[in-house]
Amino acid sequence: MFSSNIRLFVRDSEVNEGIINTVKKEPEKFWYYNNGITALCSSIGKKPLGGSGRDTGIFECKDVKIVNGAQTVGSIARAYQNSPEQVEKARVLIRFISLENCPEEFATEITRFNNTQNRIDRREFVALDPEQERIKNELQLEGITYTYKSGESIPDGQKGFDLNDATISRACKQNEVSFATRVKDKISALWENIEKPPYKTLFNRSVNGSELWKLVEILRVVDHQLTLEQKQRDGREKLFAIHSNRLILHLVYKALTDNYFSISSDLTSSQIDEIKAMTSKFLESIISETSSLYPNAYPANTFRNVTKCQEIVKKILN
């Protein structure tokens, strides 16, 4: 039944556990929460019972193959093993598509587009957080555009930044270096669940729009300086300039005094110069300490490793 699906049922999955919990605990809401199932059939025929009309009746679907919704079907089956009475209260939408008289490639196209069009990424759920809209409105009053929804863009000539910049800045500003490694390794992991940490650590009522914009301004100075460093270096040193960018930002934030984060004024030219110098200095320190501690480690992997980054920071700051 699942042979035409892009993946089989995944038994141990957070999403599937959520489906199982819903169908067992709130079966009457399952219809509203679930996207449903798509199945292909070689043909669909109506039984003669109830007349010739196709609005209602008993239909025979041959060679049923589920192409989207394998996780839903598998999760319902698992829930039924322990809670058949609850599962029987649930309803799920399923559409059957007949391939009779269809072009040969039609089945493949249905499978591909059902699993790619309107796909929901983790960051899409950030749009459900009211704190994001609050931050956006605060910045709008200052003429700064903040975009956190997919499809939004910053008009040409306007100051602004997006959710990626905000997440990187907030993560690297945390005292724990683990956030800087997480944002380097897989930024989407920080948007996993908008109801709990790490997301709630980064975005909550205490986050001020103007302060966030100042963090992004510093981020851009650091990134610009590292781009220059990359052009001036080659080999292993160039790789350090590329891959240690988030750890360097973390170190710069820690080293800067409070006046750099003041929301009452923009960064001065002298402050920008100081941030650039600090960026280059920390890059040199990271190259030196990492080469000493982990001479054979590949830079791209090193700066995704929490333990290694903690040791590097400890060496640099002590």
Image (cartoon, rainbow, N blue to C red):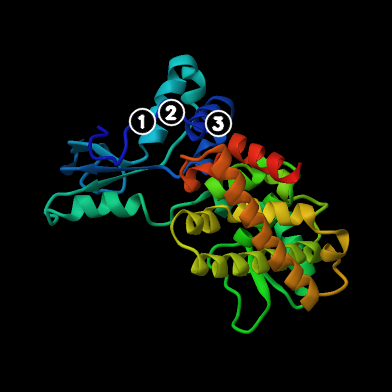
Q: Nearer the viewer, mark 1 or mark 2?
A: 1
Give the side of residue 225 with respect to residue 68, left or right: right
Res 75 label: 2
Tag 1 secondary structure: loop
Residue at image coords 52%, 22%: 86
**Closer to us: 59 or 314:** 314
In the rendered structure, which disc, 2 or 3, sits on the residue that comes first in sequence?
Answer: 3
Quadrant in the picture for the N terminus:
top left
Q: Which mark is residue 9?
A: 1
Q: CA distance from mark 1 to mark 3?
A: 17 Å
- The picture quadrant where one finds residue 234 is bottom left
Mark 3 residue element: helix
* Amino acid type of the residue tagged 2 in the rendering: Ser
Q: Please give the name of the residue rendered at 39% of the width and 30% of the height, measured from the top-left corner.
A: 10
| Residue 141 position in % (x across, y down) | 80, 75
Q: Amino acid at mark 1?
A: Phe
Q: Position of residue 105 (x, y in %)?
A: 16, 55
262 versus 306 height, above or below: below
| Disc number for residue 199 | none
Q: Which residue is mark 3?
A: 22
Using a 10 Å C-alpha cutoff, classify the residue at mark 2 as few (fewer than 14 neighbours), some (14 to 19) or many (20 or more): many
Mark 1 and 2 residues: CB-CB less than 8 Å, in contact? Answer: yes
